[in-house]
Amino acid sequence: MIKALVLNSGGVESATLLAHAKKDTDVGEIASLTFDYGQRNSQELTAAKTLAEYYRASYNLANLPLLTSESSLMGGKLDTYQNVDQYFSIFDAKEDITSSAHVPFRNGIFLAWAVHYAEVAGYDVVYAGPMGEWDYDGGYWGDYFPDCSPEFAGAFGAAVRIGTKNKVRLVTPFVWTQTKADVIKLGTKLGVPWELTFSCYSDNFIHCGECAPCLTRAYAFQKAEIADPTLYIKQPNVQRGNE
């Protein structure tokens, strides 16, 4: 039996990873690892702890006080959108969104810390949930967020094997082909309690319905043809003009 460490941000992918690990008969022990890096909305920390408790995984919180960014995740200007088409138009136009939505090398920092912890604490596998593909025909996340790309995940996984002498393995099942809608379909089959997850960038205790994660979350539920149980302050407009 292996011991699994799951990176847990309280969101859709984290919940699905926890559910997957829980169902895996080869996994004997599960721990979750959450990072407090100064994100604008601390509600995701509450959601992460709630998910860990739901799946009976130990909850480990790591503080990373030195991360700095003007990103909307960390207190920079929070961009909101009237509908999902307005948000996706940024990518259609190939605009640079790095300054507003990207924390430089965040996933690399998280993964390095997680692998360190896994090797010290005796965990065999680190599960992480970065996405590799959009939920529309605009290309890969990695085109805009390089530390979410399949190339990054593959290279980092190789570094983990070498750096730990094969003691720790990195598993990133969603980075290669799956969209958020695919993850929601899988999570639903695994019985994920979506109402316990949290995705919003705003500083509200419930989803605002206007920021990028709220729109992509609602759009993914629609694409998956699964009822969205999320409570939004403003119901997201996710009907695309070409659909």
Image (cartoon, helix red, strand yellow):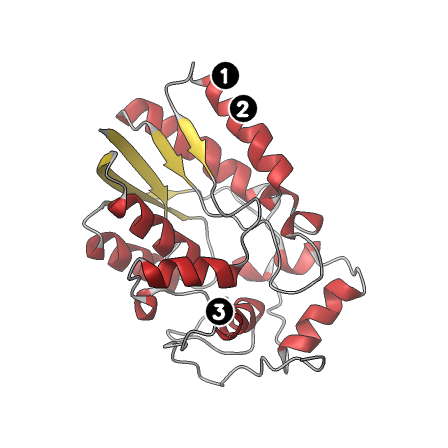
Residue 42 occupies quadrant: bottom left
Q: Which of label 1 and label 3 is nearer to you?
A: 3
The span from disc 1 to disc 2 (Cα, nearest Å) is 6 Å
Name the residue carrying label 1: 162
Residue 167, position as x, y percentages in the image = 37, 19
The span from disc 2 to disc 3 (Cα, nearest Å) is 32 Å
- Pointer 1 with pointer 3, Cβ within 8 A: no
- Pointer 2 with pointer 3, Cβ within 8 A: no
Identify the image quadrant of the C terminus: bottom right
Residue at 81% from the left image edge and 65% from the top image edge: 93
Q: Nearer the viewer, residue 57 or 174?
A: 174
The amino acid type of the residue labelled 2 equals Ala
Identify the image quadrant of the N terminus: top left
The span from disc 1 to disc 3 (Cα, nearest Å) is 38 Å
Residue 191, position as x, y percentages in the image = 28, 62
Name the residue carrying label 3: 224
Residue at 34% from the left image edge and 67% from the top image edge: 194
Residue 94 occupies quadrant: bottom right
Question: What kind of element bears circle 3?
Answer: helix
Q: Looking at the picture, does residue 174 appear above or below residue 228? A: above
Residue 158's label in the rendered image is: 2
How many dots with numbers? 3
Q: Nearer the viewer, residue 78 or 133?
A: 133
The amino acid type of the residue labelled 3 equals Ala
Mark 2 surroundings: few (<14), some (14-19) or many (≥20) residues within 10 A: some
Q: Nearer the viewer, residue 62 or 178?
A: 178
Mark 3 surroundings: few (<14), some (14-19) or many (≥20) residues within 10 A: many
Residue 182, position as x, y percentages in the image = 49, 59
Question: What kind of element bears circle 1?
Answer: helix
